[in-house]
Amino acid sequence: MNRDFSASAPNEKWLTDITEFQIPAGKVYLSPMIDCFDGMAVSWSISTRPDAELVNTMLDAAIQTVTVGSERPMVHSDRGGHYRWPGWLSRIAEAQLVRSMSRKACSPDNAACEGFFGRLKNEFFYSRDWLVTTIEEFVAALDAYIRWYNEARVKISLGSCSPVEYRRKLGIAA
């Protein structure tokens, strides 16, 4: 991807990574697929384990959003083991997606996904007290935030629309 995080249409370039949230009740991991076109979270999975099931579930859901054969997004990730495991590689190949990976130990190569995580943590995570929150409550709140991010959170770069509103204005199904 060479740090070119721009896309002229949905489902051209996707970014993924895993981020961790540590609350008193335990650790929670988020694996989203972010569309470079408008920053929409195309799919995501949340778990208490950063394992193959976390990323494979997210990828399977993302694949369900594309028209097989006509849309072949480039899927960009870091070099984490999750993205080199046979289950991930076979899913990418079967869906005829294009694979892209960051250079070793070069986080700017996935800066747009890291930017999503930064906004998420600043807007959702850091400003709250999670002391009495259960894992289940946290997962539900995180899922609700991502839905809000897609459907209602406005972005100046999208003409003060949310990603869903922006796509609707362009006549693109969201």
Image (cartoon, rainbow, N blue to C red):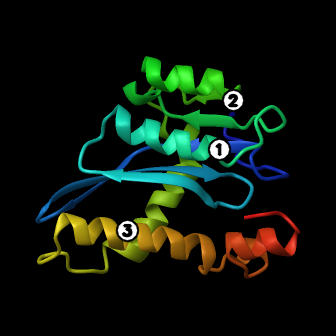
Residue type marked 1: Trp
In which image quadrant can residue 69 be found?
A: top right
Residue 160 lies, with reference to residue 78, above or below; the image says below
Residue positioned 35% across, 73% down in the render: 141
Residue 17 lies, with reference to residue 23, above or below; the image says above
Q: CA distance from mark 3 to mark 1?
A: 21 Å
Look at mark 2 in the image and give the residue it sits on: 97
Q: Position of residue 107 (x, y in %)?
A: 48, 39
Residue positioned 72% across, 38% down in the render: 73
In which image quadrant can residue 150 be found?
A: bottom right
Q: Earlier in the sequence, mark 2 or mark 3?
A: 2
Residue type marked 2: Leu
Q: CA distance from mark 1 to mark 2?
A: 10 Å
SS at circle 3: helix
Residue type marked 3: Leu
In which image quadrant can residue 100 be found?
A: top right
Q: Is residue 138 visible?
A: yes
Number of the label disc, if any, that sits on residue 58: none
Instruction: Please tell me which residue lies in front, 69 or 23.
Output: 69
Circle 2 Cα neighbour tier, 10 Å, few/some/many (<14 / 14–19 / ≥20) = many
SS at circle 2: loop
- Residues marked 1 and 2 touching at CB (< 8 Å): no
The N terminus sits in image quarter = top right
Q: Earlier in the sequence, mark 3 or mark 1?
A: 1
Q: Position of residue 51 (x, y in %)?
A: 31, 35
SS at circle 1: strand
Look at mark 1 in the image and give the residue it sits on: 14
Instruction: Decide if residue 68 is on the left or right side of residue 19.
Output: right
Q: Position of residue 166 (x, y in %)?
A: 77, 72
Q: CA distance from mark 2 to mark 3?
A: 28 Å
Look at mark 3 in the image and give the residue it sits on: 142
